Amino acid sequence: MIMADFKFEIKHHIGTLSENNRGWNKELNLISWNGREPKYDIRDWSTEHEKMGKGITLSNEEVESLYLLLNKILEMHK
C-alpha cells in the first residue's frame, strides 16, 4: 500500500503526557495538517519529531467535550 504524502506543522507544543521505553513521547500539540486549520493532536513522537505513531486529532469542540468528560471522571474519584 502506498500512502499519500502529507505535511504537518506543529504550531504549538502544549505538553508531554508520557515517555515510552523507546524514548518516544506521547504529546499534546496544536498541529496544522496539509495547511489546514490547526487541530489538537495526541500521539507518540520520536525525539526530533521526524517519526510519529498513530494518534487522535480533535477539533475545538471535541476538546471541550473531552474536558467535560475528564472533569466528570475526576469528580467520581474524589
Image (spheres, rainbow, N blue to C red):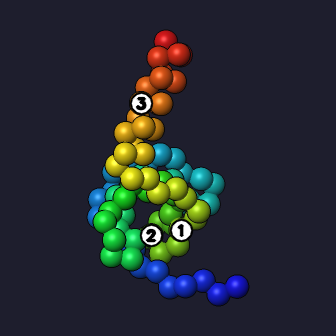
Mark 2 and mark 3: span between their CA atoms? 30 Å
Residue placed most toward the observer, 71 or 65: 65
Residue corresponding to mark 1:
52
Disc number placed over residue 49 in the picture, else none:
2
For the residue labelled by badge 2, is the local secondary structure a helix, a strand or a loop? loop
Kind of residue indicated by mark 2: His
Residue placed most toward the observer, 8 or 44: 8
Q: Is residue 4 above or below residue 47?
A: below
Q: Residue at x 55, y 85 (%)?
A: 4
Question: Dot 2, crowdedness within 10 Å: few (<14), some or many (≥20)?
Answer: few
Question: Dot 3, crowdedness within 10 Å: few (<14), some or many (≥20)?
Answer: few
Asked if the residues shown at circle 1 and circle 3 are in contact, with their CB atoms under 8 angstroms apart, the answer is: no
User: In what quadrant of the picture does the N terminus appear?
Assistant: bottom right
Q: Is residue 35 above or below residue 62?
A: below
Earlier sequence position, callout 1 versus callout 3: 1
For the residue labelled by badge 3, is the local secondary structure a helix, a strand or a loop? helix
Horizontal side, residue 22 vs residue 66: left or right: right
Which callout, 2 or 3, points to the residue nearer the camera?
3
* Residue furthest to the front: 61
Q: Is residue 75 above or below residue 19?
A: above
Q: Position of residue 59 (x, y in %)?
A: 39, 53
Asked if the residues shown at circle 1 and circle 2 are in contact, with their CB atoms under 8 angstroms apart, the answer is: yes
Residue 4 appears anywhere in the view? yes
Horizontal side, residue 68 vs residue 19: left or right: left
Asked if the residues shown at circle 2 and circle 3 are in contact, with their CB atoms under 8 angstroms apart, the answer is: no
Residue corresponding to mark 3:
68
Mark 1 and mark 2: span between their CA atoms? 7 Å
